[in-house]
Image: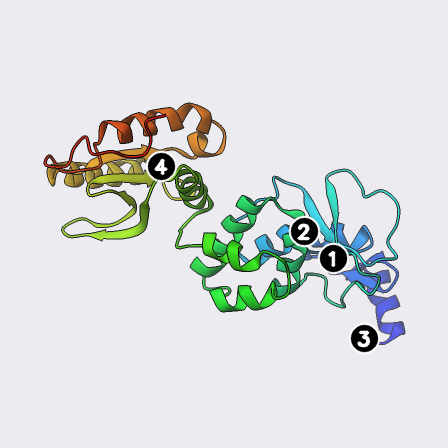
Amino acid sequence: MTKQQIIDAVGAGRLRRVRIGWYATGVADAKVERAVAAGGVLGCASALAFHGAWDVTGGTVHVHCGHDRTGRMPAGMSRCRSRGFRDDRVPAHAVDDIDVALRCAWWCLPRDELVMVCDSLMHQELATREEIRTALCGLRGVADFMERCDTAESGTESLVRLRLRRRGIELKPQVDIGGVGRVDFLVGERLVIEVDSKAHHTGEENYRKDREWDLKLVALGYVVVRLTYGQVMFHWHEAEPHLLAILRRGDQWWGSRKGARTGLDK
């Protein structure tokens, strides 16, 4: 648009001036507009969520700023940089690409949250494992980090996997069981852990399907544990001891091996 066309569009209300050189249409995303108005662009975890990855922002808007952006950010916003280099200038697009957002997130997010995001990127086919590795190339610890990323259909699944493996518990994600279908996790030979998310396990129809699913598994001899979104995200300290008790008892094994050592005696 020419300068005069922009002036006319602003005067007619078709565009809003957000900051010098940046304008928004009537359908502009509110978070993107806030990021631009704050002197940057939508970046880091917010940009990754915008592209379709699991949202770990908790409502905070992550803004990718250049080195020359100084002063406090508005309430509810967080300043992010890809590394803090003085050549880290704000890009020309209002939302960072996935590779740039990943590099910002490396320095901003706790590792478990970044794993949740990367698992989601792969599951949604927004980025391959190799593309994520390339985006983070040159950063210390990337090889170990990529080992922690795995198959998951939700961020809550990622968290359960990370926490249990940290306990030394071997579990297989996304396992197909004949006559039933794919389960979230299989521990040992027969302990199935299903992790409910708010998006796919609420409502009467989903509730009915979940219980039919559980009944089929139990009929085949499996032990089924179903974790809610709230248990994973907010009450893990209450849910985990019960899971560990089940494992210590050996319920993950068929009868001949039940009671086998689990490494969870403490």
Residue 107 is marked as 2
Quarter where residue 213 is shown: top left
Q: Earlier in the sequence, mark 2 or mark 3?
A: 3
Foreground label between 1 and 3: 1
**Residue 124 relative to residue 15: left or right:** left
How crowded is the residue under tag 3: few (<14 C-alpha within 10 Å), some, or many (20+)? few
Residue 83 is marked as 1
Q: Is residue 9 visible?
A: yes
Label 3's element?
loop
Which residue shows up at 83% across the image and 54% down it?
39
As shown in the figure, which amino acid type bears the numbered disc 1? Answer: Arg
Residue 1 is marked as 3
- What is the C-alpha distance between the residues marked 2 and 1? 7 Å
The quarter of the image holding the C terminus is top left
Foreground label between 3 and 4: 4
As shown in the figure, which amino acid type bears the numbered disc 2? Answer: Trp
Which residue shows up at 44% across the image and 43% down it?
162
Label 2's element?
helix
Label 1's element?
loop
How crowded is the residue under tag 1: few (<14 C-alpha within 10 Å), some, or many (20+)? some
